[in-house]
Image (tube, helix red, strand yellow):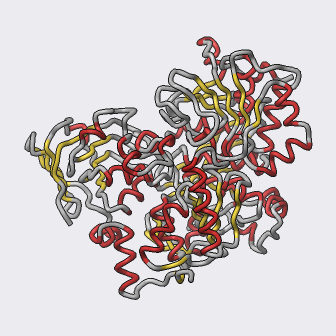
Amino acid sequence: MSVPSGKAWTFGDEINSDVMAPGIYFKESMDVMASHCLEAVNPEFAPNVQPGDIVVAGRNFGVGSAREQAALSFLHLKVGAILAKSYARIYYRNTLNFGVPALIFPKADEINAGDQVTVDPIAGVVENVTTGNSYKVSPIPEHLMEMIGDGGLMPHLKKKIDAGELKTGAAPK
Amino acid sequence: MGNTLIQKIMARASGRDSVAPGEIVTCAVDLAMILDSGGPRKIWPRLDQLGVGVYDKDKVVVVADHFVPAADPQSAAILKLTRDFVKKFDIKHFYDMEGICHVLMAENGHLQPGMFCTGGDSHSTMGGAFGCYMAGFGAIEMTGVVITGEIWSVVPETIKVDWSGAFGPGVTAKDIMLFLARELGMENAFKAIEFGGKSIRNMSMMERMVLTNMAAELGAETGLVAPDEITLQAIRDGGTEPAADALEWRSDDDATFCADHAFNSSTLAPQVAAPHRPSNSGAAQDFEKDHIKVDQAYIGACVGAKLTDLHMVASVLRGRQVKSGTRLMVAPSSKKIMREAAADGTLATITEAGGLILPSGCGACAGLGAGIIAEGEVCISSTNRNFQGRMGSNKAFVYLGSPYTVAAAAVAGEIVDPRNMLS
């Protein structure tokens, strides 16, 4: 899988799923939804984030709702990777299922907004190109490595189904 | 070494003799609940893309509760798609505008101790009040579940939380959870919370469901209450006979817990959580000096508009009026609750006091339906979550409290300790 590299966008602790994907845009397309991602905490983020940029955050990132749009918005905005001190459970599962790498990164405070950051999710290496610091972190969990490598849950399921390795319900007539 | 309740459930679901915390297991799913919001509209295109169907049309339960009743063209289209999915995939259990999913699972006898259940909504933890595993997952992951009937999980450690002593008047399960959000924090990911102790044993099922519902606010995998006679009666009330082994689903006496908390119910005061997080809580009486004016008081959601909750509201409103300049809205958690509250006079008490009754559904709680608030407005709500922007404008302010506390604020026009209004 690729090694994302881009500009860091920094956020604090307990950034919740309601600010990532506000309920009032639930019925809208993902284009509209993603354009409001995190606007309550940083209105500059969604309009200006570039493909490959890295989201850096504090503790309990994604706390709250099961809404997949919270994780999907970052994929839609082509964010390269997420680095947070810790994650809320459902958000963590969602983001990995969409193939957006999320690493636990205790030293989030050492990355400043705008720093150039490179993330290798398989090796578990984070490099802050701006400061020259390099960090060794836990890689993506072993049992999810294949799924992430496949690009997320959907391509992973497709691969397994095509290979006849998965028992599934039959499509309706 | 003994096992916790959740270890026993996950061992059974994964076909093992025993499992240890930290182990990654693949569990067979006994019930997969999906909703209009993140269910068929997200999952159906993915099933088509993969050319597959659902793993078991008896075990996939569909509920339309988020966008009901349709108030705009998008909602109407989403609901139609949900109904079309049920027909196309021949789904056996479909609840269309019957109420909020978590309450419906309890009302209709879907849950038994020892089951392993998943739901496409974070408050699916509510089901754990029946002594089963029930947890929330995103639509992408529920797609995998409805296709394969399986899901991976890390076996969680369990935090034991015991409450003993008698609750004072006006103190509820909701106050316990706002207190615990502050005490235990909102970051307990990949841990389960098991509630026990004499106070919990004396609680009704509807109150126990508040505890497990808001285990989500603590960030937990799920919350659980070991089954007893009250659980068995609730299962029977839902039209299902309890399983023969129902009462055997409990933690062993020598099970290992990662933390063990004991609290005294008799010293707990009504709690209020200030914007913008449930853990930002304190005693309701400490808010009085700030004279926080309330534009809207909202009784709603899975957690806060059950029959017991509506009874709490009525006990405050009886003989009183909602303050001029404050609006009270009440959206009962289900149609059955609406019917029962109509029959026993509760709805009359609420409407005579000036309250407005709204349809059953997720509604304003998640910013989806009637009752959302504008920039600068203040709402006190019996719901479970008050994140910035959740109930409408991201420049609005939401306080959380028990149904007593919300009703008292509706009468006073500001946040007060509800005990002054209970005679």
Q: Check the image and name the residue furthest to the bottom.
A: A164
Q: Quadrant of residue A99?
A: bottom left
Q: Position of residue B242 (x, y in %)?
A: 79, 69
Q: Position of residue B115 (x, y in %)?
A: 65, 69
Q: Is residue A172 visible?
A: yes
Q: Is residue B232 left or right of residue A46?
A: right
Residue A3 versus residue A135 in the image, above or below: below
Q: Check the image and name the residue furthest to the front.
A: B73
Picture residue at 61% right of the left edge, 50% below the top: B66
Q: Quadrant of residue B363?
A: top right
Residue B78 versus residue B26 in the image, above or below: above
Quarter the C terminus of chain B occupies: top right
Judging depth in this view, the residue of B291 and A50 nearest the camera is A50
Q: Is residue A52 left or right of residue A143?
A: left
Q: Position of residue A41 (x, y in %)?
A: 36, 32
Judging depth in this view, the residue of B34 and A106 nearest the camera is B34
Picture residue at 81% right of the left edge, 56% below the top: B230
Quarter the N terminus of chain B occupies: bottom right
Q: Is residue B228 left or right of residue A82?
A: right
Q: Is residue B4 visible?
A: no
Q: Position of residue B259 (x, y in %)?
A: 53, 49
Q: Check the image and name the residue furthest to the right.
A: B344
Instruction: Report how many numbered discs are placed on residues in the image.
Output: 0
Picture residue at 40% right of the left edge, 86% below the top: A165
Residue B390 versus residue A151 in the image, above or below: above
